[in-house]
Image (tube, rainbow, N blue to C red):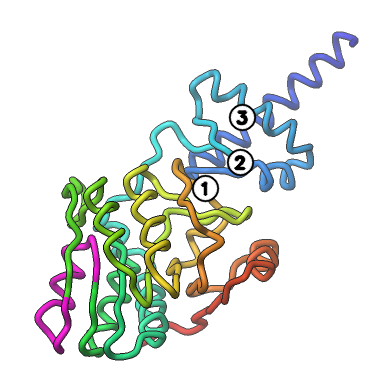
């Protein structure tokens, strides 16, 4: 290859590296599919670029993409303030699926707390949750029976995770499970930011008959560090805005019902 061709190839690679790193810095994660389409190169080229950048410790390579070196879930208080009306609307629609007297597993998180607030109108529920706030929201009212799963208290929010929480779910079978999302990739797959959280959410999906993923529109099209098993078991996804066409088409091919709240609840 001539010197000028080598220089051109090197310049193009550096352009892609900059594009990828800027994307990771802004979004926290990127997918090979998205980068390939936006940069107009093959997925194998993007895979090599990510591998090179990972070797330079400039990002972390994961299956299907990459994440930033410092990626972690945003602070809980900050997450509460983001899209509060959208999460409220998701909560009301999710709660509309649940009749009085049902048994419900509820994951921790800001969107699932919106589900719990909407469920306060129901009575005689059997609730299993790892979220202390949800336990207090639904406990001691309307004849509900609420079980707080055992486990280790998280340092950044009022919930528990760990093997004790995961193992205790093997004792239960609920009518519904409502789980949140760290990220939802276009494969599609469900992701979270820690192994403990991903394992617990996977077990929650296993332990219910109707499995509902509640996530606002900001979670679509991204990945995180840990994959949650059992995406194929999800029966419903409830969100506040229809995903982009490519993601919408992928979800339409799955055996699940996508429910979109077009207008926030006031």
- Tell me what residue is drawn at x 68 percent, y 26 percent: 48
The earlier-in-sequence mark between 3 and 1 is 3
Nearest the eye: 185 or 189:
189
Q: Secondary structure at mark 1?
A: loop
The label number, if any, that marks residue 64 in the structure image: 2
Whether residues under marks 2 and 1 lie with C-beta atoms below 8 angstroms apart, the answer is yes
In the picture, measured across the screen, residue 132 lies left or right of residue 236, that is left
| Residue receiving disc 1 | 223
| Residue receiving disc 3 | 50
Is 211 colored magenta in this rendering? no
The earlier-in-sequence mark between 2 and 1 is 2
Q: Quadrant of the N terminus?
A: top right
Per the rendered image, the range of residues in magenta is 128-145
Q: CA distance from mark 2 to mark 1?
A: 8 Å
Determine which quarter of the picture holds residue 149. bottom left
- Tell me what residue is drawn at x 62 percent, y 70 percent: 255
Q: Secondary structure at mark 2?
A: loop
């Amino acid at each position: 290859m001539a010197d000028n061709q080598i220089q051109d190839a090197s310049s193009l690679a550096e352009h892609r590296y900059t594009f990828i790193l800027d994307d990771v810095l802004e979004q926290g994660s990127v997918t090979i599919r998205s980068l390939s389409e936006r940069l107009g190169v093959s997925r194998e080229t993007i895979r090599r670029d990510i591998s090179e950048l990972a070797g330079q410790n400039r990002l972390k390579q994961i299956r299907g993409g990459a994440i930033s070196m410092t990626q972690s879930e945003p602070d809980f208080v900050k997450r509460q303030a983001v899209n509060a009306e959208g999460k409220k609307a998701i909560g009301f629609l999710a709660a509309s699926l649940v009749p009085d007297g049902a048994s419900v597993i509820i994951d921790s998180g800001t969107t699932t707390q919106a589900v719990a607030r909407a469920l306060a109108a129901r009575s005689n529920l059997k609730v299993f949750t790892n979220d202390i706030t949800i336990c207090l929201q639904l406990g001691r009212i309307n004849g509900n029976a609420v079980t707080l799963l055992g486990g280790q208290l998280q340092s950044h929010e009022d919930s528990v995770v760990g093997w004790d929480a995961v193992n205790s779910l093997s004792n239960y079978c609920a009518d519904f499970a409502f789980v949140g999302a760290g990220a939802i990739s276009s494969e599609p797959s469900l992701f979270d930011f820690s192994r403990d959280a991903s394992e617990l959410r996977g077990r929650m999906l296993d332990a219910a008959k109707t499995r509902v993923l509640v996530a606002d529109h900001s979670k679509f099209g991204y990945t995180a560090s840990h994959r949650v098993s059992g995406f194929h078991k999800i029966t419903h996804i409830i969100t506040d805005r229809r995903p982009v066409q490519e993601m919408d088409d992928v979800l339409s091919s799955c055996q699940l019902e996508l429910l979109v709240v077009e207008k926030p609840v006031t």
